[in-house]
Amino acid sequence: MSKQLLQKQADTIRFLAADMVQKANSGHPGAPMGLADIATVLSKHLNLNPANEKWLNRDRLVFSGGHATGLVYSLLHLWGFDVSVNDMKNFRQIHSKTPGHPEYGHTHGIEITTGPLGQGIANAVGFAAAAKYAQNTLGKDVINHNVFCLCGDGDLQEGISYEACATAGHMNLDNLVIIYDSNNITIEGDTSLAWSENVKKRFQAIDFEVFEIDGHNFDQIDKAITEAKASDKPVLIIAKTAIAKGSATMEGSHHSHGAPLGEDDIAASKIKAGFDPEEKFFVPADVKGAFDKLITGSTAENAWNESLSAQTKAKIDELQNPNFDSIVYPEFEENASVATRDSNHKILNAIAAAIPGFLGGSADLAPSNKTELKGMGEFPTGRNIHFGIKEHSMAAITNAMNLYGLFRVYSATFFVFSDYLKPAARIAALSNIPQHFVWTHDSIGVGEDGPTHQPIEHLSQFRALPNFYTFRPADASENIECWKTALPMSAPTAFVCSRQGLPVLKNDRAFGEVKNGGYLLKKRDNATVTIMASGSEVSLALQTACKLSDEGINANVVSVPCFDLLLEQDKEYINNIIDPNTKVFAVEAARGLEYYKFADVVVGMDTFGASGPAGELFKEFGFTVDALKAKITAELN
């Protein structure tokens, strides 16, 4: 490699990033400039095809420090992805292809939306895990790419990074290379203000191979990446760098982290590097040629395609195009008592039996979540993934596995612990990632474990999340319909399931469908009351409606398995299932405030629950037929 050309390539990245931030008067020039030398050398090692960003055997590159967007967009442009100079000039502007943090599906070539610091490291682990499973499924001659991740001090300070990397070490993901931009700078100043751990020892302790290099020495960078690709362990490359490397006045300063360098500094920096200070967004022809991957990428992909057997192509096609109509769902006996976590277990196994790319696991709760796929082995050769007690990294890892291009992957924990993974669930919603979240122990029905384990506000929280579909099935048969609705969706879905047994209702939905999010389950002539409910409270609503009819009060019952889908229905449908002439009550053993969208009265929780047997708790907090009937009649009177 010509050192002179490498330096020119790196400086081109630096000044593209600096120009972007300066023109937008917003952004982070320091990290892109500090990483430019590493990115230049790494580019030589990457197998990418800008003509087909979905090529299965491409290397994955994850930018965990999403604020380093100046670097991201510079590289995408230089490699030949659909990011133009004009797009870079519109950096951080509304409706541009170059938003403040990279977004999957929005900008060509972005592998995943990383968002909050640390997420990208877990995403990289997810891509590496998916690749390892794909390798075991399709063969090492078919899948042999690497996963690279660029991260910084902030990523490694976030707890999710330790969770995820501990998983990578345990799984021995030898296809994973994390490059740590160690510049010892965060927003507040030097990292020593709040951080003093030995990162090398941390990663050695979780069975990574660790290299330490000068992040501005081209030979050292190249040697480390070459050795990392050949390692039989996951690798961390600790690259000592200077933030804003190449800046005339701001190199090494924390002030360069999140603010423009200024016109004078950029001009002086360009002169120092031998660039014309008057040229903005300038890409020399030899630099573009050295970076461009359109020809090499297409050649590599074509050779890979030609190497595939007909059998392998058929297997890939089957994984990429699952036939959800082939699923043979279980049957449940009417009036039997079946917890929806138990019906969910049978449904998961039915899906896995028909869909070869369906896999998943739990945060050490598979026996309680009922998520084991029976007889399907342990990951990475089988389909049961053991994430350990690491909810946040589990969800972020699974986000990436779902974007790998072959698999549909679920994750599971207790509903109350969804708090630990909310950032990854939010990214899934933002990015249209079809992850299935299985959350059991859904209400005060958890019982004796008490208020620390009883989700109260959680349904409301996830129903408030845009593009996230929370299903809380009333019984086993409704659970099946929820899965039929969720599987084809290109958005994240959650299944909130009961610990306690629920009666299997008559499978008759003459007045609406689960796919609409809510439907009229029980209709009475001349009704004056409508009772809305989800999950375990649906059978309570039905029983209460029968008791009310004994007193001459006719009540309709609306089941709401997915509040989010119900919100998407038109007014005509809403009026068909929720009679505008009735007084509307909603009942839920949770906060339930969102029901005021439709209801006049919400019977919900306004405390955190208590410790005791589930039946006693439902009685204590007013979720019984007598209590609900009394509440409704009092309101009517």
Image: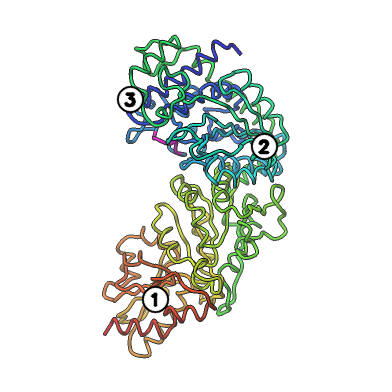
Disc 3 marks a residue whose amino acid type is: Lys
Tell me residue 168's x, y (percent): 65, 43
SS label for mark 3: helix
- Dot 3 or dot 1: first in sequence order is 3
Q: Is residue 154 above or below residue 615?
A: above
Tell me residue 442's x, y (percent): 51, 67
Q: CA distance from mark 3 to mark 2?
A: 39 Å
Find disc 3 in the rendering and name its residue: 23
Disc 2 marks a residue whose amino acid type is: Pro
Residue toward you, 195 or 262: 195
Query: Which residues are the magenta region?
Result: 99-103
SS label for mark 2: loop
- Asked whether, in this view, residue 417 is left or right of residue 16, the answer is right
The single residue placed furthest to the bottom in the displayed view is 551
**Colour pattern:** rainbow
Q: CA distance from mark 3 to mark 1?
A: 58 Å
Tell me residue 417's x, y (percent): 52, 59
Does the magenta-highlighted stretch encompass residue 101?
yes
Q: Residue at x 38, y 13 (%)?
A: 268
Find disc 1 in the rendering and name its residue: 557
Image marks 2 and 1: residues in contact by CB distance under 8 Å = no
Q: Residue at x 33, y 81 (%)?
A: 632
Q: Residue 234 — which label?
A: 2
Residue toward you, 600 or 70: 70
Kindly indicate the quadrant of the structure image that contains residue 459: bottom left
Q: Is residue 96 above or below residue 577?
A: above
Q: CA distance from mark 2 to mark 1?
A: 55 Å
